[in-house]
Amino acid sequence: MYQYYFELFPKPYIFAPEMKYTMRNTMKNFVSVCLVSAAALTFSYAQTSPNGKIQIEYQDSALNITYLHQDRPRQVASVRVVLDGEPGAQSAVKQVDYTMPTGKRSHCTNAYRERLYPLAGGATLCVRAWDDGVTWGSDSRDVPGLQPGRPHLVDFSAARHDWLMQWSDSYEGFYPRDRNHKAGQRLGYPALFEYENGFYALLSESRLDSMSAASSYYMTDRDEVFEVKADGEGVHGDQTLIIGSLADVVASTLVNDNSLPCRIEDATWIQPGVAAWVYWAYNHGSNDYDIIKRYTDMARDMHLPYVLIDAEWDDAKPMMVDGVSVPMVEAAVRYATQCGVRPMIWYNSSVGWVNGAPGPKFRLNKPEDREREFAWCERIGVKGVKIDFFSGDNNRNIRYMVELLECAARHHLLVNFHGATVPRGLQRTYPNLISVEGVYGAEWYNNVPTFTSRAAAHNATLPFTRNVIGSMDYTPCAFTDSQHPHITTHGHELALTVLYESGIQHLADRPESFLYQPEVVQQFLSELPTAWDDVRFLSGYPGRNVVLARRRGQRWYVAGINGTDEAMLFPLAELLAQLPVQQGKVMLLTDSSIDDRPWRVERFSLDETYTTLLCGARGGFVLTLDF
């Protein structure tokens, strides 16, 4: 009878929680309704998060995950797992406590209980029930090749809406709500699901190391049922499911919490910051010393700590410096250092787009070449490297990324991966990984006209999807146009610098555009943190609007955007009342309704009445609260 169940229902059959518990207690009409004997349900093992909100129950060859919401257990997802024996005992509560030099929170804490589940072939599945989610993966990560990356099904049929991105090796795409996908279509992390009664789950991956391949998930012929598969051999990372309200999801650090601890003995040299960035306005500007100098001067004048020298710096002709011919990039690095600005430079990873792509190429692939190149960077004063054009989530790319991070750390170099997989916990293990692209960002104004009309809604989706899992190098804040125009407002663009967390925040616009802005805007950018002590979700819904608050020291930064084409009213007093602050001085920067004045600036005390803020179509605002 037990086997007959699976022939009739090839996927794990999911009962509504209230139905499941009722049947477990009474068993009335159970055989006649489900064609399953009562004996089949006795094979049941419960696992509970330390705070009691999440329960995992192995039953009928599936790990059924429920979430206690409004005092009732609600079905979240089911993971199809066939055991080869009984699970081990649930562990005692284990604590995770660590600090990060970058990210949404400087001090991260979480707790979990774990249980080991034996699988066929000697493999073991480690399942952790955390206070804000569930992770599952191999418990033998340190033994190369011992545990295969096993495809498995995950059923989200209890969800009512989803935001899914079509996979690409650069993870640059939109997250539309309820997009129709075909069976077999590959999708990229993270994936957001919305449930009845207002809770959410976000699926991603964590705990990668040099022996891992990353995974992705594929549509099956059943709605909201996905197959998870590795993009290579051996063990892939742990599937990571964040569960709770939108506030819980946005604030979660679970991807890092479940990943390997820091392997850099001394991380005190890692300094996040804002950077001037040439590429958005001048695609080929990094082989021109005069253009680089202009961006360096901007960084100096606005007190920005970094300047990025992007692709093609190796194509520039040598320059005479103090009567000696030197490579242009060395002259540019020297000038930046003299200005008190820390330079970063770009490399082609030379494993993805190579033919027809910009250089420098093939300087990092071999260990001896990589060591020599990074030693040269350290010697001339380079503080970080941006490495671009990887080719997916396979073992080679993940191992290569880890090797790059380890070598860069030996030479005190920050790393920013572009054209690469999304964050999967390596930023905790190697905190010199200060940002990752993996996002359809402002760079796309260079490429296609599509972004112009879709950017506002897309921007209001990213805080709930891509940016949840780690630093995101979107390259925000453009007041002028690139090759294709933008129709988001100045207030919207400035708000992105706070909404989007990134250890290195590249400002996309031209120097003259930033220097033209009023002093209050320049000062805001000059003082902008890129690493935070806390984050609070205040309001919003994916694709429509979002308001987040981030704290650094004794200052809260609050940013909000309107992702729609209609004006929107934000209840500012109600939003600020959610912060754990009773008094303080507030400065508000938003769009002006006067045509020749793009900015409206207001200053007031927190205890003064300031009830609502009207935000125009695709508009936005930022405010600072000193307490």
Image (spheres, grey):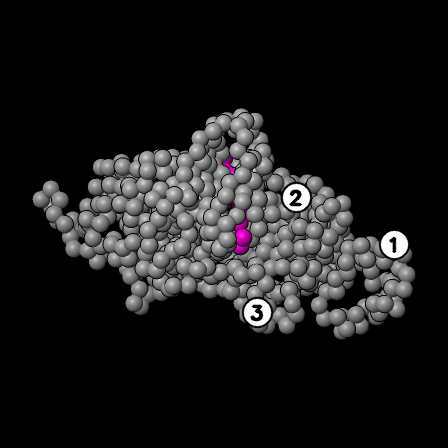
Q: Residue at x 54, y 30 (%)?
A: 609
Please give the count of numbered marks on the rendered protein: 3
Tell me which label, 1 or 3, sits earlier in the chain: 1
**In the rendered view, would you say 371 is above or below 349?**
above
Q: Residue furthest left?
A: 323
The residue indicated by pointer 2 is 131
Q: What segment carries the magenta color?
A: 543-551
Q: In the image, which disc is placed on residue 362?
A: none
Residue 270's image quarter? top left
Q: CA distance from mark 1 to mark 3?
A: 39 Å
Amino acid marked by disc 3: His
What percent of the width, then of the height, locates residue 274?
A: 36, 42
Q: Regarding mark 2 in the picture, which secondary structure is present there? A: loop
The residue indicated by pointer 3 is 181
Q: Regarding mark 1 in the picture, which secondary structure is present there? A: helix
**Which marked residue is nearer to the observer: mark 3 or mark 2?**
3
**In the rendered view, would you say 508 is above or below 447?**
above
The residue indicated by pointer 1 is 25
Relative horizontal placement of residue 475, taking residue 312 as reference (left or right): right
Counting other residues with Cα less than 10 Å from the Cα at mark 3, is it few (<14), some (14-19), or many (20 or more)? some
